Image (tube, rainbow, N blue to C red):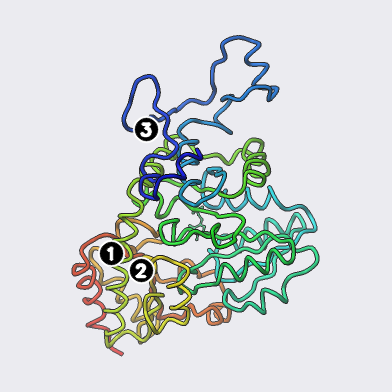
Amino acid sequence: MNHWNDYSFNTRAIRAGHTRTHEGEHSEAIFPTSSYVFKNAAEAAARFGHKEPGNIYSRFTNPTVRTFEERLASLEGGERCMATASGMAAILSTCLGVLKAGDHIVASQSIFGTIVVLFNTILAKYDIKTTFVNLNDLDSWKSAIQPNTKLLFLETPSNPLMAVADISELATLAHAHDCLLVVDNCLCTPVLQQPLSLGADIVIHSATKYLDGQGRCMGGAVIGDENIVGKDIFAILRTGGPSMSPFNAWVFLKGLETLDIRMQRHCDNADILAQWLEKQEAVAHVYHPSLSSHPQHELAQKQQSRFGGLLSFEVKGGKKAAWHVIDSTQIISITGNLGDAKSTITHPATTTHGRLTLEQRQKSGITDGLIRISVGLEDINDLQNDLLRGLALTDN
Ligand SMILES: *Cc1c(COP(=O)(O)O)cnc(C)c1O
């Protein structure tokens, strides 16, 4: 795998990890097989006894899944990647792999909602407690760290408000307290941001989003050092079994081949749409790091190569006006997914963040007038016209 380091990002995105079979296929083969055949009983015994390398069973090794893992590890600049059945499986496997009862997590409060539920209800049952802090407030991270804290967990930029945290600063803090820094890099992908190079220890992906890029398959990944990912996380996958299917791995590894070109267009469209929305009379505020009005605009410029394809905006007139804009669209899909070639639109206060109390929502800026758009790859003029229908008629 290491010889791939000599090549640039896009060459690795297209070629890393692929070994052709004796058939000479050009496109990567899919290996839908649960187990592997041994030459004889002695070879079987040697593989099961860890005396020789090689495939045994697809719960823990499969050639198609390995191609995806090696390709993504190379793009994130990590030694090792383990693919998982979903993004949530990646996070669960990481926690099970590196934590034990009595340990403590400090996490940003602006993370994917299901992760909050995982930490607060499931991990809590096994005596792993979590303190949630403000993503951008280094002091609140500092003061939340306890002697038993083992993990700092965040997502940057955050969804849906696109707040940006300083990864290097948090890595320094984590390491001063013998903690691991885990960054969910789902929104940026390695095209826009490579957290390991900024000091993070583990990168998490929901491959379901931009890595697939067309909203087809569920998948996830954990990337980091051989020591952590190759041992602790591998052990959870091997024994616990939240593994990625070979078919899904194939879809994702083909997705990686066009990741850069897609991310550039997602960013182009989001930059244009953010500026355009800022000029609309019916819009009170736009949240996108490309805007100079964004509080972490400069940090995003330093830490990311571009600003990402997700944005949110608040319309004047609360929920009624927001629902009107959403319901007036004809091409943008009303769905919760993001990172798709198709643009999607959601009302966070009544969907993704509907479980929160009004007070929690207000604290985290999820107002009733807020609309989130995952900006897709369609023609930007068509997207603007699709939104204008609802924005022009919003009475406020
Ligand atoms: C979707 C998402 C997840 C969870 O991934 P699944 O593939 O849906 O399990 C985790 N983190 C972020 C930032 C996400 O957007």
- Where residue 40 appears, x then y in whole percent? 60, 9
As displayed, is residue 94 above or below residue 318? above
Q: What crowding class fits label 1: few (fewer than 14 Cα within 10 Å), some (14-19), or many (20 or more)?
A: many
Q: Which residue is mark 1?
A: 332
Measure how far apart labels 3 and 1 are at the Cα level. 33 Å
Q: Which residue is mark 3?
A: 28
- Where residue 386 appears, x then y in whole percent? 22, 70
Q: Nearer the viewer, mark 2 or mark 3?
A: 3
**Residue 328 falls in image quadrant:** bottom left
**Residue 320 falls in image quadrant:** bottom left
Q: Amino acid at mark 2?
A: Ile
- Where residue 322 appears, x then y in whole percent? 35, 78
Q: Are marks 1 and 2 in contact (CB under 8 Å)?
A: yes
Q: What crowding class fits label 3: few (fewer than 14 Cα within 10 Å), some (14-19), or many (20 or more)?
A: some
- 183 and 216: which is toward the camera: 183
Q: Quadrant of the C terminus?
A: bottom left
Q: Is mark 1 within 8 Å of ligand 1?
A: no
Secondary structure of the residue carrying tag 1 is loop
Q: Which residue is mark 2?
A: 373
Q: Residue at x 76, y 52 (%)?
A: 100
Q: What crowding class fits label 2: few (fewer than 14 Cα within 10 Å), some (14-19), or many (20 or more)?
A: many
Secondary structure of the residue carrying tag 3 is loop
